[in-house]
Image (spheres, rainbow, N blue to C red):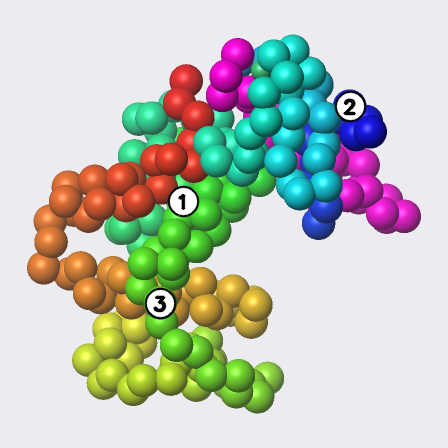
Amino acid sequence: MAKPSVFFPKKFAPKKNKFAISYYFLYNFFMKIICPNCGNDDKFYHLKDGRLKCSLCKKYFTPEKKNIHIDEKKLKKIIEMILKDKTLNEILEKIDISKFKLLKIKSLIREEIGRELKLKFKDEKLKKNMSTFEKCCCILEKQNKNFFNFLEKSLKGKGGIRSHNLKEIVSEYFWKFKNQPKSLKEKKEKIFQMVKDKFWFE
Ligand SMILES: [Zn+2]
């Protein structure tokens, strides 16, 4: 028998780590899980196959969809600022949102972009003294001179990027490169359509 529990993905399960508990609360606070059938947001039975069973209406559903609560206009503004290459801090200055939630949204957008592009990456050994641009060039399988020029220009003046984010960064900029001829409005709408199913709008 499954025990009732608040939905909590395995990878964030509290460990013997002093940060785990605060992370747990942050996660539950922002990733509001709501039963798509009855709207219950309190208790769920956690099933082994990853689905949840609502404690109220007893219906089964798969979480993760629509797991970020946000105002639609706010999300569109964030997409616009990402398209304009604004940094995390610049976005935080203009939009009333927590850094945690913004990071989650940014990586979700990149994830969806990556899914659409299906870029092929190589597992290259990266050297410490390489610039972010050099690292990005190294991991992309197909060489494309125009894209690399675009990437070099885009990354100029940007600080270091953690290596585990490299693929996400390359995907983001490849999408921007590919969609250059489109207007900002079109691009904003395209990304919004791509990610909207992942959000729960207020
Ligand atoms: Zn329910």
User: Upstream in the sequence, badge 3 or badge 2?
Assistant: 2
Magenta stretch containing residue 24, yes or no?
Answer: yes
| Residue that badge 1 annotates | 90
Q: Is residue 85 left or right of residue 38?
A: left
Q: Residue 25 or 155: which is nearer the viewer? A: 25
> Closer to us: mark 3 or mark 2?
2
Q: Residue at x 49, y 21 (%)?
A: 36
Can residue 115 be seen in the rendering of this structure? yes
Q: Quadrant of residue 6?
A: top right
Q: Amino acid at mark 1?
A: Glu
* Residue 29, percent from left and from top: 63, 26
Compared with 48, 136 (above or below) is below
Compared with 94, 72 (above or below) is above
Q: Residue 135 or 38: which is nearer the viewer? A: 38
* Residue 134, percent from left and from top: 42, 83
User: Upstream in the sequence, badge 2 or badge 1?
Assistant: 2
Q: Residue at x 68, y 31 (%)?
A: 7
Extent of the magenta region: 12-38
Q: Residues within 10 Å of mark 2 (few under 14, many from 20)?
A: some
View quadrant of ligand 1: top right
Q: Amino acid at mark 2?
A: Pro
Q: CA distance from mark 3 to mark 1?
A: 29 Å
| Residue that badge 2 annotates | 4
Q: Residue 105 or 37: which is nearer the viewer? A: 37
Say if mark 3 contacts mark 2, CB within 8 Å: no
Can residue 99 be seen in the rendering of this structure? no
Q: Residue at x 64, y 30 (%)?
A: 52
Q: CA distance from mark 3 to mark 2?
A: 38 Å
Q: Which mark is residue 118?
A: 3
Q: Secondary structure at mark 2?
A: strand
Give the tally of numbered discs: 3
